[in-house]
Amino acid sequence: MSCKTILAKEISASYREELKKTIKSREIKPKLVGFLANEDPAAIKYAKFTSKTCEETGIIFELRKCNREELEDQIAKANEDDGIHGIIVYYPVFKNHRDQYLQNTVRSSKDVEGLHNIQFPIKNYIIPCTPLAIVKVLKYIKVYNPVLSHGNRLYGRVITIINRSEIVGRPLAALLANDGGKVYSVDINNIQVFYRGTGLKLKKHEVQDTNLKLEEILPISDVLITGVPTPSYKVPTVLLRDGVVAINFSAFKNFEDNIKEKASIYIPTIGKVTIAMLERNLLRLYDYQLKVN
């Protein structure tokens, strides 16, 4: 079997070391506050892992548990606290449109996850953690072609993302399409294509609805990225292209047990890379707040 499994620990190592050195050399103590207002096992696991990683890196982390009806007020208080440099909310909370509302109650200058829909004046605004982590993963495994110019380095790559959430799937599809990839975005309703056109004639991607089915796009996909939040969903290995790059960012394994029979590279989780990107975002917000204040 020629498949290589790459762990998030390996990919995130250089970022974590850089963070440790930066925090130690500058003698700073950035503070991150996390809000947990649910009993979701994946959210609880993410919160525990955030705490452990921040402790190792030198970041002060405080987890605040509260009732979901109190969460908005708690976020408002944290927004006004100058001693807090970053805020993270562990979703889902209400599992409906109220979650998107909550995302925008976090002050943009403290939004380490990059979920706020208003960009504030900071160079290279904060990119959502998970999409940014996946971009870093793709660069690490050389899916990005360094021979091509910046902004075109995914030219010729066909990428399928099974997830079109506003938090991860949609922004990720946009990022990869703007870097030159032809991206199929899959959700329960349909399949959309994010693309800059033949020869990358467009400067920015366009989004089009398609009548395609998953059975048609998986065999032509160089990269498959999955983020379906249910343990029952599994991508049929038989449909995959031989040599596919398979990346799972769901809390559950979205691939069948025989995925390594088809994949050339398999990345089962990206959690540690996501946390590293969250911590990098926190440092940028910390510096931004120092300049403003």
Image (cartoon, grey):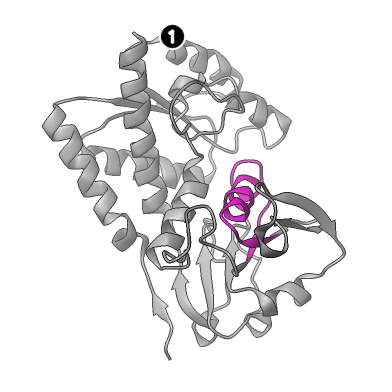
> Front-most of 140 and 83?
140
Say left or right for 126 vs 167.
Answer: left
Give the camera-side residue of 267 and 55.
267
Residue 67 sits above or below residue 2 on the image: above
Residue toward you, 229 or 109: 109
Magenta run includes residue 166: yes
Residues drawn in magenta:
159-184
Q: Position of residue 22 (x, y in %)?
A: 19, 36
Instruction: Give the residue number, with chain letter if any, for mark 1.
Output: 80
Q: Residue at x 32, y 38 (%)?
A: 51
Task: Name above or below for residue 20 compared with residue 189.
Answer: above
Residues packed near mark 1 inside 10 Å, few (<14), some (14 to 19) or many (20 plus): few
Residue 255: image quadrant is: bottom right
Q: Residue at x 38, y 10 (%)?
A: 81
Q: Position of residue 228 (x, y in %)?
A: 63, 58
Q: Position of residue 213 (x, y in %)?
A: 81, 70
In this rendering, is residue 217 above or below 174? below
Residue 291 visible to an observer of this rendering: yes
Q: Is residue 23 above or below residue 84?
A: below
Residue 63 can be seen, yes or no: no
Which residue is painted at 64% across and 71% down in the image?
234
